[in-house]
Image: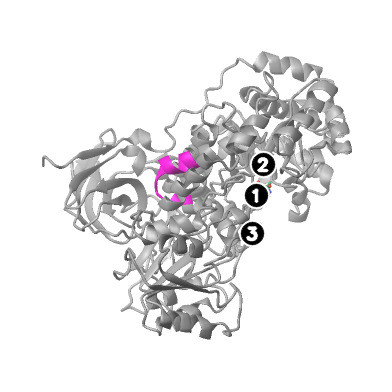
Amino acid sequence: MNNKIVLIILLLAAAGMQAQYKYDNRYESKIDSIIKLMTLEEKAGQLNQLAYGWGWGPTVKSEVKGDYAKMVAEGKIGSFLNAVGADLTRDLQKVAMEKSRLHIPLIFGFDVIHGFKTTFPVPLAEVASWDPAIVEYSAKMQAKEAAATGIHWTFAPMVDIARDSRWGRIVEGAGEDTYLGSIMAAARVKGFQGTLGNENIAACVKHFAAYGAAEGGRDYNTVDISERVLRETYLPPFKAALDAGALTFMCSFNEIAGVPSSGSKFLLSDVLRNEWQFKGFVVSDWNSPGEMINHGFAADLKDAARISITAGLDMDMESRAYTAYLKELVEKKQVPVADVDESVRRVLRVKFILGLFDDPYKYCSKEREQNFVMSKEMQDAALKVAEQSIVLLKNNGVLPLKDAYKKIAVVGPCANAKKIPLGSWEQYGDSNDVVTVLEGIKKTYPKADVTFVQAVTITDTTKAGFDEAVQAAKDAELVIAVVGEDGHMSGEASCRASIDLPGVQNELVEALQKTGKPLVVVLMNGRALALGAIDKNADAVVEAWFPGITCGTAITNVLTGKINPSARLPITFPKVTGQIPSHYNHKNTGRPNDPNNHYTSGYLDTDINPLYPFGYGLSYTAFKYGTVKLSKQSIKATDKITVTVPVSNTGKLEGTETVQLYLRDMVGSVTRPVKELKRFVKVNLKPGESKDVQFTINEEDLKFWDINMHFSSEPGEFRVMVGGNSRDVQQETFTLE
Ligand code: NOJ
């Protein structure tokens, strides 16, 4: 046992246990005095956020648009989104500080989703690292760059659990699992907010709530889920982000069971303000109060303003409902002034916490802007994160690549694409800064003859370019096909009815396979794809997602083995679109699938198993699991139970395994999922090395929203499952007395 190290995974590491930003009463009397001085128009103005438009850039002259300057001077705007740049934000802030009656600073928000100018891998990719430290680091660096351009506040992290890859916004979140999503939500908040200094920005947890449960995977669509599903599956990442200190929330566009989030007293007041004791503010999504008219929940914009403010929606992004109607609604006693004051208090509180009253210009530093934006430090950080995000899905031995090749064919629409790797929220990212896979391969193999054939575009239906690609493959020793989706085929309003590889890319890969040459397929995409044909035809499959500006370098480093891949899937990859929903933590049903019994839950035209399960990913080395041992077979609610499993590196290279622990409550007052992730840890092992991995479980891990609508644990049998992904697990049982 000498060479074995025991790793104790402390429960405290779990999301939800992080220290929340410590609110105290230090600002409250100042806020009281400001509110006393404010007119109703100024209060409504404080709750009004408008979009400035795009203006940042070295060649764009900083200016303050006339109307906006006038409105700021009149106290009619409390916040801008999309006003960026040290000069521009300083100019705007100056108007607020010098020309407005009460000198209340503006707060500038922006969507820093995976970077500002230095584009990092998309959020789903980062989460594939299964490494909260990397995810926190990424958010920290993104915040540092954004804060240098005058931004105070990012509309991130998106923590929406998404079980349907047709939904384009799955790319912005942490995938399908609530526990993994909660850990990553907390990591991102900590990364963005740090110590709330001038290199940090406020986080905005979105979209509250259950936006990812849109029917049919269609964006903005209706959500109808039970309170149990809401509480168990969709809300925990928000709570974890709040516990990590998130200062703001954004409500979602969707309705839940007939009530749009922008007007949901249950979500915004009962849960968020009262149950969770949230002290920051909630911003609407773009015009989401106004959209309640289309929902059929508000008669007109005035009605929308009344519904939203009384529900607890503090700031109005772009529907202009509050500035138009709050004064009248209060004067006519249709809205209590106390509701308006409470929202103003929350907005002012966050401005105080960010230090904007002390130094309204603390983020407007030309020097930091010049030093940090696209600095080497940023680009190195983006590379580090990208390398940890790439998942190896198949490898029959062709990877890692050899040290030398004479002739390599690089094929496909993503192979030399400059824009695609930037993904869906590229913001000020510049495609000229992107290193493509072709460039990465050429740099790594300077002596090789590297032929590039694009062959098709992403959505082409013609095979006219196939012949040239096949000829290049025939002439080469190695074929690298880089295929996938366009960067904007996922993200907002970018849903797909089919999650197959678009166009004729499957056919292209098949044609390349027929040459008999070693074939590596690299994928760029923002969701799970149905990859049956690729898995069948390729010798190796590498999921690179949208890796950001360092794309080609990160991918080449993984292909050559400079980086031994250790990322894992944060979403299930089904075999076909029709298997959706295919999340691993489904219920068992009364007739669990049995391929030999027709009258069980299944399909006539496919089996129910995914192609690649949640948590799956390979390494260039091999790991072996010893027998799982539990410290006790039976526990009381106050006890802890320790789960120990020896893990060995039986391959030839140093590598990192992601050890995962799942639980199942066998019988409950309500039915429970077949398995739920409860712990994971990444373990680095040298060849021949072995470590005992140890997890501690306690009663909190056994709780669920029971038949009486409380979180509680129930006595009975629990199954513990441990393995390297959600499918390949060993199991043991224990009893809760
Ligand atoms: C709409 C999107 O839903 C939201 O995520 C984003 O933060 C806002 N637009 C602002 O750009």
- Where does the image place residue 240, in percent across and percent down from the top left? 48, 38
Q: Is residue 265 above or below residue 538?
A: above
What kind of residue is marked 2? Phe
Q: Of marks 3 and 1, which one's residue comes earlier in the chain?
A: 3
SS label for mark 3: loop
The type of residue carrying mark 3 is: Asp
Task: Specify whether residue 688 is in view.
Answer: yes
Q: Nearer the viewer, mark 3 or mark 1?
A: 1
> Which residue is disc 3 drawn over?
219
| Occupied quadrant, residue 40 | top right
- Mark 1 and mark 2: Cα distance apart in space: 9 Å
Q: Name the magenta segment's main secondary structure.
A: helix
What numbered label is drawn on residue 257?
A: none
Mark drawn on residue 110:
2
Which stretch appears magenta? 126-138
Check disc 2 and report its element: helix, strand or loop. strand
Whichever of callouts 3 and 2 sits on the residue coming sooner in the sequence is 2
Q: Which mark is residue 427?
A: 1
Element type at mark 1: loop
Observer able to see residue 588 = no
